[in-house]
Image (cartoon, rainbow, N blue to C red):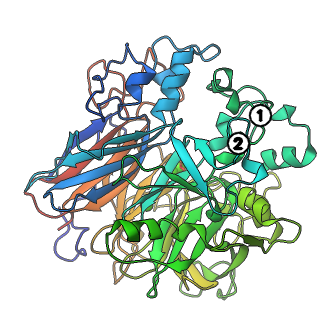
Amino acid sequence: AADSGTAPDGTRFTAVQPNTDDAVRVPEGYEQEVVIRWGDPVLPDAPGFDIGGQTAAAQEKQFGFNNDFAALLPVEGVPHTYLLVVNHEYTTEPFMFADYDSEDPTEEQVRIGLAGHGLSVVQVRGKAGSGVLTPEFGRYNRRITGTTEFLVTGPAAGSALLRTSTDPTGTRVAGTLNNCSGGITPWGTVLSGEENFDQYFANAELVTDPVAAERLARYGVEGGATERKWERFERRFDLAVEPNEVNRFGWVVEIDPWDPESVPVKHTALGRFKHEAATIHVTGDGTVVAYSGDDERFDYMYKFVSSRRMQQGGSRTAMRHNMTLLDAGTLYVARLSADRTDSGDRTDNGEFAGTGEWIPLLRSNEDGSAESFVDGMSAEEVAVFTRLAGDRVGATKMDRPEDFEPNPITGKVYVALTNNTERGVDGAPPADPANPRVNNKNGQVLEIDDDHAGTSFTWNLLLVCGDPDEADTYFGGFDKSRVSPISCPDNLAFDPHGNLWISTDGNALGSNDGLFSVVLDGPRRGETKQFLTVPIGAETCGPVVQDGRVVVCVQHPGETDDASWASPASHWPDGGDAKPRPSVVAVWKSDGGRIGM
Ligand code: FEO
Ligand code: CA
Ligand code: CA
Ligand code: CA
């Protein structure tokens, strides 16, 4: 039976049960529809999707592959109309092309791959009483790809570390890659994290300078050919040819979706690492705080505090000012301790909790100069090799920090720590209070009470994920017999009531990934309920809970270890014998009511 009036607003729905169906499953009384699929036209002159007749020229005008982050931005003055802004994290060529030879890709396949990366901006129209969203050819529609020109700003702009033979200025980069999650800024732009950029760069073993080699190793850049072999046709991806091109990826990028001609920006003041995303909290005086996790086992959590203050109002002048907010300020990395706990890793009431401090790494000044706080590293080096700076100051090694999300109602900040199967294994760092399990397959969710512009915080674990029947799980103190199992939290979002929504990637409990609501306050704190599940092989991304609908990105459906082009593990969303296609899905209540009410 559905929860009655006792469940908080926004969470009154009947939980979807774990399953391995090749479908999106939503609660009883809800409806769903695909909004847009890989290959659907974004620009008016785009051809329709033809899986056997793909070209790079078509893909540059069509919706890209592997949708991850989604933002739904209302178009002012046009009822029920939004810009849907979506990241395309990566391409999976063996699932895209019938004739793909991973040892010998064609140049056209490589160019399709580059065009399938980046972001899409698509106008979508809703209708009253329904959550359906229909793509339109609006004037803001745009594709950003692996070749779109970006401007570099902040302390590493123009640095010798960023100069290449095609860009001796070190300020103009072709493209953005591996855009995982992101955030919406209060001034109307979208932030996107360049995550696993290491995989695009070949021949690291030919870099013989020991300092450069150590830096590449710290960022996971491996020797030999890359999996996609782009370096054969785009020499900038060959480190032996362009040793600095790799330093031009791994940034937070900012897109102004309201100006399709605008040059998007890479903000180097926020540091370079495998940015899952960046999300914003604005303090009472207009100071902007950007939080970002480095998604790697044993890597760090960061925040940036602006020196400039946000200007209110939607004028172009205010927008131009606000797009400089992430260029000047201080970058910090987190160090956590457990000195609030009474014994072992839990307080007397069973919580995992402690304190923490933000250690300054880099100050970027408004005049373009910058200062390092790290002994033995210049400001440019801290900006470009931020992981090494975190190492030097003794930052806390976390279990893969994914999405950060500040609660817009309480200001508390949440971090998904997705998993870390190497924790405590074979000499790797042991469990610690915030990362309390060895061989951590299921992840945890950290809650931070932050002095946003300051340097201290307290923290506790909201969830220690997994099968609630297992003793090592924790659901905010809530009765574990009444929660949904949850594993590998990745993306976080808030609904209008202040409930946390978590999407998962890599469910280690044997069923498909999904989306969950979590109550944060009151007697039902920790109550975790599954709202939807995604098809076989997919991870759940996006998520947006807004205006009577839930929007999720279904990323990499059908990508299982034993799947192939000839025998896909999924036929979603088109069904029958169709190949799977990454797609965006909208879910709404059949009666037109608000979600979870
Ligand atoms: Fe692309 Fe950290 O997930
Ligand atoms: Ca992610
Ligand atoms: Ca988020
Ligand atoms: Ca992930």
Question: Which badge, 1 or 2, comes first in the chain's sequence?
Answer: 1
Q: Position of residue 70 (x, y in %)?
A: 37, 51
Query: Mark 1 vs ligand 1: CB under 8 Å?
Result: no
Residue at point 65%, 72% (across, down): 367
Question: Is disc 1 in contact with disc 2, using a CB cutoff of under 8 Å?
Answer: yes
Which image quarter: residue 34? top left
Residue that label 1 marks:
239
Residue type marked 2: Val
User: Considering the numbered disc 2 on the image, is that residue within a helix, a strand or a loop?
Assistant: helix
* CA gap, disc 1 and disc 2: 8 Å
Q: Is residue 133 left or right of residue 335?
A: left
Q: Position of residue 160 (x, y in %)?
A: 78, 50
Task: Classify residue 473 as left or right of residue 556.
Answer: right
Q: Which residue is mark 2?
A: 246
Question: Residue 173's spot in the image, x, y percent?
Answer: 60, 43
Quarter of the figure that contains the C terminus: bottom left
Q: Is residue 586 visible?
A: yes
Q: Nearer the viewer, residue 130 or 381?
A: 381
- Percent of width and height locating residue 373: 79, 75
Q: Vertically, is 531 above or below 352?
A: above
Residue drawn where x is 23% and y is 58% of the image? 75
- Residue lying at 59% horizontally and 49% vertically, measured from the top left: 195
Residue drawn 63% across the image and 58% down it: 294
* Number of numbered callouts drawn: 2
- Position of residue 398 relative to residue 70, above or below, is below
